[in-house]
Amino acid sequence: MEIIKVILTSLLSVAALFVITKIMGHKQVAQLDFFDYVSGITIGSIGAELATELESPYNPLIALAIYGLASTLLNLLAHKLPKTRKYINGSPTILMSGGKLYRKNLKAAKLDLSELLLLCREQGYFDLSEIHTAVFEHNGRLSILPVSKNRPLTPNDLGIEVGNAHVGVELIMDGRVMGENLRRLGRDENWLGRKLREQGYKDERDIFLGIFHEERDELTLYPNEP
């Protein structure tokens, strides 16, 4: 009977925390999905209780399992049924578009003007006239589309053709050669040693990090501090 009571109170706690977090708004979430936020803080609290509960350790253990299971099921539901995501995780809110601020949307997002201006400054925008669209995401972050004249210049704007960028490959880390990466590039240690000597280093022990950029055939080296 006691176990059933624990299960029911745990489920009630799940529902109550979920509703309260929804009411509090996205800014409380801080880059987490709603239920990840709720389950994270609650599982931590229950885990602490479990560590100190000597008389009935099974009660917090059951509650811990229920929270973990509920979190997994809700994430699975959001993955399988995309339409449920806006109810579970929330949905983006347009706070500003075409230079116009939406008071109702700010209120719905539980943000005031001071908080909006703070979020804009964090993105590097101190003047709202530089912003075309501002979207408050479901993870509590602000996405900004600047007005056209303030967007960064790209090679396409200049009519310049550029090749695709490639991810650099780490060949040396903490003074050790990453043999698997070296072989994947079709190179050997003799080639690497020659590259090191070309830049004035005796061997890999002098290097903290070495990254090879294949598209430029260039090895960038970060030496150990003296």
Image (tube, rainbow, N blue to C red):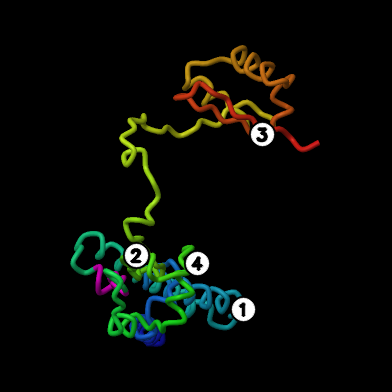
Q: Camera-side residue: 73 or 225?
A: 225
Look at the numbered disc 1 and give the secondary structure of its residue. helix
Q: Earlier in the sequence, mark 1 or mark 4?
A: 1
Residue type marked 3: Tyr
Residue occupying image coordinates x 35% and y 56%: 149
For this view, does 169 lie left or right of residue 106? right
Would you identify the image quadrant in which residue 176 lies?
A: top right
Q: Earlier in the sequence, mark 2 or mark 4?
A: 2
Circle 1 residue? 52
Mark 4 element type: helix
The residue wearing badge 3 is: 222
The residue wearing badge 4 is 122
As shown in the figure, which amino acid type bears the numbered disc 4? Glu
In this rendering, would 67 be left or right of 90? right
* Residue 117, percent from left and from top: 45, 75
The N terminus, quarter of image: bottom left
Would you name the residue on which mark 2 appears?
72
> Which mark's residue is nearer the viewer, 1 or 3?
3
- Spatial distance from mark 1 to mark 2, Cα to Cα? 26 Å
Q: Residues within 10 Å of mark 2 (few under 14, many from 20)?
A: some
Where on the picture, by quarter, is residue 127?
A: bottom left
Residue range corresponding to the magenta coloring: 85-95
Q: Are marks 3 and 4 in contact (CB under 8 Å)?
A: no
Residue pictured at 40% horizontal, 71% vertical: 128
Height in image: 193 above or below 53? Answer: above
Residue type at tag 2: Thr
Q: What is the x, y in percent for residue 30?
A: 46, 70
**What whole-number distance in Å separates the C-alpha atoms at marks 1 and 4?**
41 Å
Residues at marks 2 and 4, CA–CA distance in whole angstroms: 33 Å
In three-dimensional space, the C-alpha distance between marks 1 and 3, rounded to whole angstroms, equals 48 Å
The alpha-carbon separation of the residues under discs 3 and 4 comes to 30 Å
